[in-house]
Amino acid sequence: AHVLVCAGAGCISSGCQAVKSALEESIDRLGLKREVKVVETGCMGPCDLGPVIVVYPEGVFYRQLKPADAVEIAEEHLLKGRVVERLLYKAPEDGKTAVTSDQIDFFKKQTRIALRNTGIINPESVEEYIARDGYRALGKVLTSMTPEEVIECIKKSGLRGRGGAGFPTGLKWEFSAKAPGKPKYVVCNADEGDPGAFMDRSILEGDPHSVLEAMAICGYAIGANQGYVYVRAEYPLAVQRLSLAIEKAREYGLLGESIFGTGFSFDVEIRVGAGAFVCGEETALLASIEGRRGEPRPRPPFPAQEGLWGKPTVINNVETWANIPPIILNGPEWFASIGTEKSKGTKVFALAGKVNNTGLVEVPMGTTLREIIFDIGGGIPGGKRFKAAQTGGPSGGCIPARYLDVPVDYESLTQLGAIMGSGGLIIMDEDTCMVDLARFFLEFVQDESCGKCSPCRIGTKRMLEIVERITRGEGRDGDIELLEELGHGIKSSALCGLGQTAPNPVLSTIRHFRDEYEAHIYHKK
Ligand code: SF4
């Protein structure tokens, strides 16, 4: 038997290491060491059920375990083959018991491409990655495809950047490939900073080789031999697993000189960010890699043409990279058959807030919010009413209940005044004050503004002052209009994406919940 122990950040904080130790000790004591292998994986997704383990070959899913439960599982299930009923998952809606994870709606309704290995393999084992087709896509491009064919394949797949802006990935690669200037570079943006977002973290912690393989594929396609992963220092486990993955990949000849003996060389280094939110903006990130202050600069020129040290640079985020190997292996038509007309493939969301099943989910683009929140998320706790969802974190906007059936894709969300963003999805119930929510995000971006341009530096501060006085019950007639005017002004004049999107939470809550602002101002709530 194989026992997978989820060691994602959520399960680590709920005590999975103690559960794993108890399990291993019991396996040892019962003399089962030769028959049972315990494997530590990355995040399986259902964070609120942690610590979780899955026992194979049956795939029995146990949740919310304590060390004593692990002892019982070893004695009953592993030794005697009897499933421990009381530790199985019970659906909150109807109390139905699920034995295996594929009987649980949370898993059943997902399509996992970027997360295909996360929560399944041991992220510290390159052998397990290889056993799941790892590095086969790199082998395929190096031995049977020209760089142009690789770019064409990514273009045809319809993959768009998962970091927020949704720019077509293949087109970006093509710009870099065609841009004059050498050497060229490949960069992975792992500076995920939105409050409530942990998609990239989970992929790096759970499947680091998928990112390395994808970066090498891009290197071949654009003619680059060096890659950098810019990862935030707040993700020590991701840094550690990624470092180990780079080391192992070099050892196996999957990174470094003449990969697979083809003459193509590619290597990756890690750069650890110091925790500035603005460094997730690509030009600030590049400046930071170069050792300069992490401040954005005007675009154009875009990094694809003039990036790192002024050379053509492809920069994609972690989730985008994780999609590349399966696209190469399964073909662009396969990927393009998933999702909607303009938004292909899947999207990973970090589901958080007032929802029964919080955690990491991956669904085809075009899935409705209702399916994500109610079918996968299990609805709102305590029988409360769903009020709104905030997508895209501090740069995004809120979507009220009447749009629950809108398909989640780039275009639909933009139309509603929200954005896809990188994938943070925070659910609010009827008790949430939308003005407070807007204040929280505004406070965050105001604090993280790098201060380089005045619309963002001063404008967000003025907006925050107004929102704060409204929430204190000191709002004035005309404040809402002033917020709108300031918000639109900042959006159209700020230098980078941080400032251009900073007013979104305020503007979208005014748009959909103006009555709550009015209630604060005129009825002094
Ligand atoms: Fe800095 Fe804000 Fe201007 Fe961006 S918009 S450059 S974060 S001050």
Image (cartoon, rainbow, N blue to C red):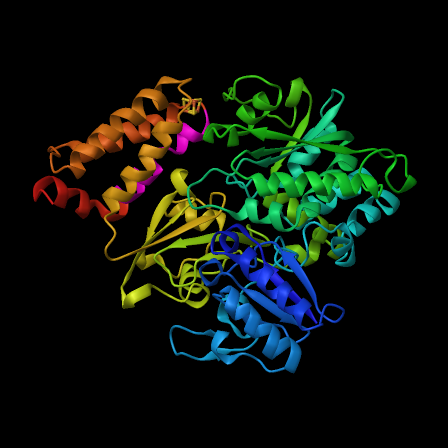
Quarter of image, res 288: top right
Q: Residue furthest front?
A: 29
x and y percentages locating residue 352 in the rendered image? 41, 53
Residue interval drawn in magenta: 496-510
Residue 95 to residue 62: above or below: below
User: Residue at the spot x=78%, y=31% of the render?
Assistant: 223
Q: Is residue 498 magenta?
A: yes
499 relative position to 331: left or right? left
- 66 or 320, nearer to the observer: 66
Query: What percent of the width, then of the height, locates residue 100?
Result: 57, 74
Q: Is residue 329 visible?
A: yes
Ligand 1 positioned in quadrant: top left
The residue nearer to you, when weighing 175 against 216, is 216
Q: Tell me if residue 340 can be seen.
A: no
Give the percent coordinates (x, y) of residue 164.
Answer: 50, 40
Majority secondary structure of magenta residues: helix
Q: How far from the left and from the top, in percent, is residue 21? A: 60, 59
Residue furthest out toward the left: 523
Horizontally, is 489 left or right of 478 in the view? right
Q: Is 474 displayed left or right of 335 in the figure?
A: left
Corner quadrant of residue 470:
top left
